[in-house]
Amino acid sequence: MAELVVKTDNIIRNIQKIDDFLKKQNIQWSLVSKVLSGDKQFIRKILTDDVTSRLHSVGESRLSSLKTIKEINPELVTIYIKPPPANIIKSLVKYADISVNTSLSTIEALNREARKINKIHKVIIFLELGELREGVVRENIVGFYKKVFRLSNIEIIGIGSNLGCMYGIEPTYDKLLQLSLFKQLLEEMFNKKIPLISGGSSITLPLIKKKLVPAAVNHFRIGEAAFFGTSPLYNKKFQNLSTDTFSFNANVIELEEKWNVPDGVISEANIGHTSETDADKPSHKSYRAILDFGILDVDVNDITPKDKNINFLGTTSDMTVYDIGQNINSRLKTKYQVGNKIIFKPNYMAVARLMNSKFIDLKIE
């Protein structure tokens, strides 16, 4: 089977470096652990005592993953990082100490459930700042907070926003400043303290050094930078973080020299995805390697072969084909043969999908 290799030492060092960087800015942060996919071995390897002691909390978007984290470490503060659906409210109050919310009826349901078990459930309310995903529209925010402040078993610990995830709206200084101004307004109007402004994520990290993050923004939610060493703002490595954190290794299960153009009538019945074939070019032969993964496992657009001289040709449900040219290296030796592995660098989405494929081996180093 193809395998996903996890280099936990590099990930842990990334977490330590991010924590050191944010501490200098007086910023708390939550490790967004979605990429762990609730895998117990992976969770135990990453969420060590040294790591968790650095964190405000661990954030998840899957209730089953939060349950697993709490089972492994009941003392760890957990945060459900998207508005919860109504059918998980009971379990959410049990496994999430904090939740992100944008719906009054949902918070009221959380309050009823928390009251039943004599628990205070904490919430961060998100504002809509232009990304057009989750968030209370700004003109409704005062009335929204007023109603939530009245709930007996709900504690508002923050105001926040999510930028850069759907349309890629940048978290500019002006947008983040709006969170600061709303926090000041709400605290003055209701004589309540709102401890956190949760306005930062991996996309915001590069803006700190440029003084483009208001000082009042004091909570970040970070996944990509910790697990991949990159910020999606410029899709580049952030400072001295390691980007050598995951490797996807696929097995060569067939290697033959074949023509570059299919032979026969091409119908609409194909279920594969192929690269564009230029039928006007002269026919030629090259070596094709068939690898043991397919569309069900990962999108080929989310993985990059370490060997820059091989090219994607096509993929089906469980096999993928790459053109490896004449299969000769610089020393005029055979590069690949059946049984060898071809190594890929996966991005965030690739790892998320591979972690959820039951047809891929997981190797945690």
Image (cartoon, rainbow, N blue to C red):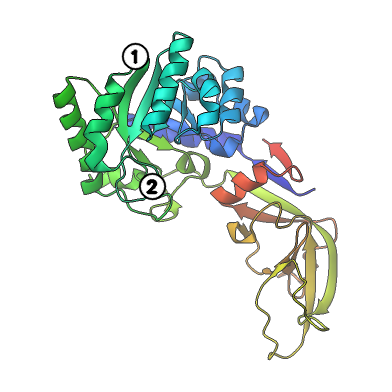
Task: Look at mark 1 in the image and give the residue it sits on.
Answer: 152
| Residue 345 percent location from the top left of the image | 61, 53
Residue 96 versus residue 355 in the image, above or below: above
Q: In this rendering, would 326 be left or right of 356?
A: right
Q: From where the camera sits, is residue 333 visible?
A: no
Q: Nearer the viewer, residue 272 or 24?
A: 272
Q: Nearer the viewer, residue 193 or 5?
A: 193
Q: At 34% from the left edge and 32% from the top edge, which residue is drawn?
A: 125
| Residue 324 percent location from the top left of the image | 73, 70
Label 2: element kind:
loop
Marks 1/2: CA distance? Answer: 35 Å
Q: In this rendering, would 183 be left or right of 239?
A: left
Task: Look at mark 2 in the image and give the residue it sits on.
Answer: 203
**Is label 1 in contact with label 2 (beta carbons under 8 Å)?**
no
Q: Local crowd at mark 2 within 10 Å, few (<14), some, or many (≥20)? A: many
- Which residue ends up furthest to the top in the rendered image? 118
| Residue 160 percent location from the top left of the image | 32, 36
| Mark carried by residue 45 | none
For the residue marked with disc 2, what is the amino acid? Answer: Ile
Front: mark 1 or 2: 1
Q: Quadrant of residue 101?
A: top left
